[in-house]
Image: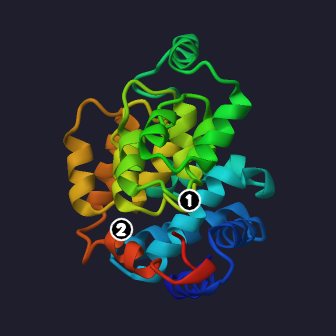
Amino acid sequence: MPTQEEARTVARFIHALSGGADVRRKAAARELARRDPLDSNELIGELIALSRAGWGPAACALSDFMAALEQEAEHIPHVESLRRLAHVQSLDTVADLFAQGPAKLEMDADAAARADANAFSQSLGHLKQQARLTRDPDTLSRLATVSNPSVLRNVLINPRLTEELVVRIAARRPARPEPLIEIWKSPRWSVRHAVRRALVFNPYLPPETGAKIVPLLNTADLRELVANTSLHPALRAQATRLLADGTRTGTASEDLDALTARPGPRGHG
């Protein structure tokens, strides 16, 4: 079984990789795939504990492992058994990562499509191109309200997009889950503490995704999450368990912002 020192070694390795978030996410997936599921769970549990203790490299690596579980599941052969085995191993903070079921609140897909059609007369292809290339902040703000995830995917790579607007998109209600998930998948924006907060505090975010974000929050956020009855019970229970594991020394989300503020392609942002 992985020890805390082995988890530190893995975290340092992932953290030191060049090539950006995609490279680190895929490396995290390979790390899980090469282990048996029991070892994978132990490793994730150790990384959560190290991150909660405020150790920066673990906070950074944990973000990559959470992204791997969300986006690289098809490359992790035993991913379906991790939740069941985490319960057997009494690794509750790991089992919590595999929350299932609908969001606390849901927006009807037809209603969302009608709202898009009423707001925009252009073709989908035109909207996607405009979202990616527009230099006008007002146009970008309007396009950010489209519920079609392919449009938002292009908004998220627009170089004129600001964190303030991304936070507004992430907090928007009512909302379809697909655009919110696109924000979580964005290597540029998903590392931002304010963006993570906005996502996880949005009751329209599916718990399957929210559960991967909760361990990346700081103690103040977790306490606020526990107290917020408008959020999914599974996420509130998850936050309660993380708080019970001990008070953090430092703020991992803020540490992560500092750690990932690297020049060039090396950084998360």
Q: Which residue type carries mark 2?
A: Ser
Disc 2 on helix, strand or loop?
Answer: helix
Whether residue 268 is situated above or below residue 206 in the rendered picture: below
Who is closer to the viewer here, 77 or 186?
186
Q: Mark 2 Cα within 10 Å, few/some/many (few <14, many 20+)?
A: many
Residue 5 spot, x, y in % from top left: 52, 88
Which residue does the image show at 39% across and 24% down from the upper left? 174
Q: Quadrant of the N terminus?
A: bottom right
Residue labelled with disc 2 = 253
Picture quadrant where residue 21 is located: bottom right
According to the picture, the residue beneath numbered tag 1 turns out to be: 66
Please name the residue shown 59% across and 42% down the image.
131
| 115 to the left or right of 19 | left
Asked whether disc 1 touches disc 2, contact meaning CB atoms under 8 Å apart, the reply is no
Whole-number angstrom distance, CA of label 1 to CA of label 2:
14 Å
Instruction: Judge from the rendering whether residue 230 lies leftward or rightward of residue 169; answer left or right.
Output: left
The structure's colour scheme is rainbow
Residue neighbourhood size for the residue with mark 1, other residues' Cα within 10 Å, grouped as few (<14), some (14–19), many (≥20): many
Q: Position of residue 73 (x, y in %)?
A: 72, 52
